């Protein structure tokens, strides 16, 4: 079973999410190598699979939101740990104000809680996706 680096998989899922349909990423079930397909960047380390090949040897990396590790993770954290600031978090989220969210975490002394929540939720989601697709998450 091919092993995948969790940080690389998370980063690629975020890239697919941010690409708004212009970025596709495929993981080789044989090697665990992630291939990013888009107009701006082509992985030159290995021959590129076709995004439409329908090859059982590859599985498409879904957008981060589909995995439950995208922006919705912030809202889930707020519901669980910042219940009285959910409206503020939603406003920051809408405005894409990551610095404002960081300042809120600092004011609430919640940075460590956020980092732990983010790390655990992300690893669980990535591990589940890997298991569903015949892959193994490293670590």
Image (cartoon, rainbow, N blue to C red):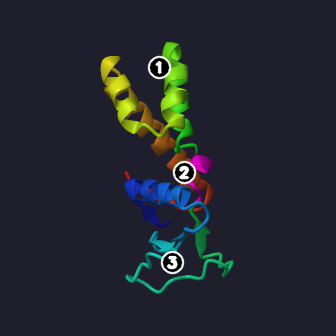
> Considering only order in the chain, which callout, 2 or 1, is on the residue closer to the N terminus?
2
* Mark closer to the observer (1, 3): 3
Tell me if residue 63 is in the magenta stretch: yes
Rendered position, 65 above or below 107: below
Residue 103's mark?
Answer: none
**Mark 1: few/some/many CA within 10 Å (<14, 14-19, 20+):** some
Residue 122: x %, y % from top left = 47, 43
Tag 1 and tag 3, C-beta contact below 8 Å: no
What's the magenta bit mostly, secondary-structure-wise? Answer: helix
- Per the model, the C-alpha gap separating discs 1 and 3 is 40 Å
- Per the model, the C-alpha gap separating discs 3 and 2 is 20 Å
Tag 3 and tag 2, C-beta contact below 8 Å: no
**Mark 3: few/some/many CA within 10 Å (<14, 14-19, 20+):** few
Q: Residue furthest top?
A: 84
Q: Residue furthest bottom?
A: 47
* Residue behind mark 3: 39
Q: Which residues are magenta?
A: 62-67
Q: Quadrant of residue 113?
A: top left
Residue at figure coordinates x 50%, y 37% from the top left: 95
Residue at figure coordinates x 59%, y 60% from the top left: 20
Helix, strand or loop at mark 1: helix
Residue 82: x %, y % from top left = 47, 18
- Per the model, the C-alpha gap separating discs 1 and 2 is 22 Å
Helix, strand or loop at mark 3: loop
Question: Would residue 106 appear left or right of 74 to someone viewing this image?
Answer: left
* Residue behind mark 2: 64
* Residue behind mark 1: 81
Helix, strand or loop at mark 2: helix
């Amino acid at each position: 079973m091919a092993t995948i680096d969790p940080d690389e998989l998370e980063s690629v899922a975020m890239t697919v999410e941010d690409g708004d349909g212009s970025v596709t990423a495929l993981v080789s079930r044989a090697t665990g190598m992630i291939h990013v397909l888009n107009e701006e960047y082509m992985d030159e380390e290995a021959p590129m699979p076709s995004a439409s090949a329908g090859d059982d040897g590859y599985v498409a990396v879904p957008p981060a939101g589909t995995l439950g590790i995208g922006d919705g993770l912030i809202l889930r954290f707020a519901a669980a740990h910042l219940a009285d600031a959910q409206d503020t978090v939603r406003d920051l989220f809408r405005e894409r104000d990551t610095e404002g969210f960081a300042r809120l975490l600092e004011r609430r002394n919640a940075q460590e809680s956020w980092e732990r929540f983010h790390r655990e939720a992300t690893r669980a989601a990535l591990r589940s996706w890997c298991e569903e697709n015949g892959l193994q998450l490293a670590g």
